[in-house]
């Protein structure tokens, strides 16, 4: 994961101080690109421990087209809780629950989840139900079909950035637009990420899209190629500076390998139990607060 450490070093050396929506403040650069050869190992961060369970369940949730956090709460994944909890906490219905109690109630109570667990038309909705003049467009199914029919096309694109719906989303898409590319029997993907939280978000994004490439390649009968990660506003929050300095002081370890259940051949059929990382030996987790 040398490319990720180089990104941190660049922002620490060249970043400019900027204010942001959350009021936290950042060091930021504009425009950066990283490339990960997926043949060389699975790009799961080794200089701090990542939570594969969260990464995998979130990706499955996206692929399923879901926008309510109930599925995530039922599987112990808390990475989207802050936004609906903040909305609930500001409402007249708030009964003093902390965020863990809120998530537990979302998991257990379907009616409560329907009222308070919804994020609006975020990633999964746009991936699977993009509104079009002739009805909803399932971008994932469409891109799979197009990759089979015409792998050399330059139109293998999925977009989560839908300007007409931004104000209805709890958080506008950070990883906004991705494109697939086939060459030499390998599937590659390039992501454009408009806003990149380098310490907390980017390691998850790298692993998530690497998983997506593996899932897509399995469905298409291809090998995996590169994941190319292009960042717009790449930033380190001011309350993460000590954490990133600790992280880049650690020596990267060997990348793990990814095992997928050989019986699963469809992008839409993968479950948590169909995925395993072998040889993942990271340094300890480093905690950091989410800027909401």
Image (tube, helix red, strand yellow):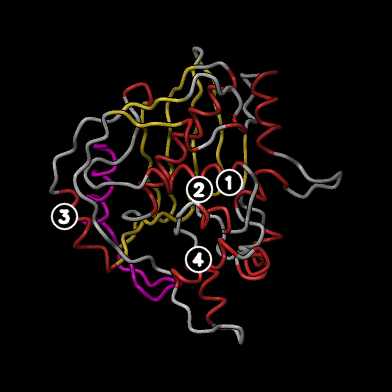
Question: How packed is label 1: few (under 14 Cα within 10 Å), some, or many (20 or more)?
Answer: some
Dot 4 or dot 3: first in sequence order is 4
Dot 1 or dot 4: first in sequence order is 1
The residue identified by callout 2 is 58
Question: How packed is label 4: few (under 14 Cα within 10 Å), some, or many (20 or more)?
Answer: many
Expressed as whole percent of the image width and height from the top left, the position of residue 40 reads 31, 23
Q: Residue at x 53, y 36 (%)?
A: 271
Figure check: 70 above or below 271:
below
Q: Nearer the viewer, mark 2 or mark 4?
A: 4
Q: Nearer the viewer, mark 4 or mark 3?
A: 4
> How far apart are labels 1 and 4 at the CA level?
19 Å
> How far apart are labels 4 and 3 at the CA level?
31 Å
Is residue 89 magenta-colored? no
Expressed as whole percent of the image width and height from the top left, the position of residue 148 reads 66, 19
For residue 54, side relative to residue 133 (left or right): left
Q: Which mark, by number, is residue 103?
A: 4
Report the magenta residues as a range.
1-26
Secondary structure of residue under mark 2:
helix
- Quadrant where the N terminus sits is top left
The residue identified by callout 3 is 246
Question: How packed is label 2: few (under 14 Cα within 10 Å), some, or many (20 or more)?
Answer: many
> How far apart are labels 1 and 3 at the CA level?
32 Å
> How far apart are labels 2 and 3 at the CA level?
27 Å
The residue identified by callout 1 is 62
Expressed as whole percent of the image width and height from the top left, the position of residue 242 reads 19, 62
For residue 76, side relative to residue 3 (left or right): right
Q: Circles 2 and 1: CB distance less than 8 Å?
A: yes
């Amino acid at each position: 994961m040398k490319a990720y450490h180089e990104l941190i070093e660049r922002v620490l050396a060249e970043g400019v101080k900027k204010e942001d929506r959350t009021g936290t403040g950042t060091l930021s650069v504009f425009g950066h690109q990283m490339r990960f050869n997926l043949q060389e190992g699975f790009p799961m961060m080794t200089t701090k421990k990542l939570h594969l369970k969260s990464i995998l369940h979130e990706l499955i949730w996206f692929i399923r087209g879901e926008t309510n956090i109930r599925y995530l709460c039922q599987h112990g994944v808390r990475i989207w809780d802050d936004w609906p909890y903040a909305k609930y906490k500001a409402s007249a219905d708030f009964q003093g629950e902390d965020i863990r109690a809120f998530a537990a109630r979302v998991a257990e109570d379907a009616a409560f989840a329907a009222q308070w667990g919804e994020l609006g038309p975020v990633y999964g909705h746009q991936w699977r139900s993009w509104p079009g003049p002739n009805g909803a467009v399932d971008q994932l199914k469409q891109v799979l079909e197009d990759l089979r029919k015409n792998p050399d096309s330059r139109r293998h694109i999925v977009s989560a950035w839908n300007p007409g719906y931004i104000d209805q989303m709890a958080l506008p898409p950070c990883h906004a637009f991705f494109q697939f590319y086939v060459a030499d029997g390998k599937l590659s993907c390039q992501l454009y990420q408009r806003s990149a939280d380098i310490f907390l978000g980017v390691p998850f994004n790298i692993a998530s899209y690497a998983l997506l490439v593996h899932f897509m390649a399995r469905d298409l009968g291809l090998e995996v190629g590169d994941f190319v990660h292009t960042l717009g506003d790449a930033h380190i929050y001011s309350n993460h500076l000590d954490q990133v300095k600790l992280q880049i002081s650690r020596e990267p370890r060997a990348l793990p390998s990814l095992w997928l259940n050989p019986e699963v051949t469809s992008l839409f059929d993968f479950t948590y139990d169909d995925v395993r990382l072998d040889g993942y030996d990271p340094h300890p987790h480093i905690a950091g607060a989410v800027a909401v």
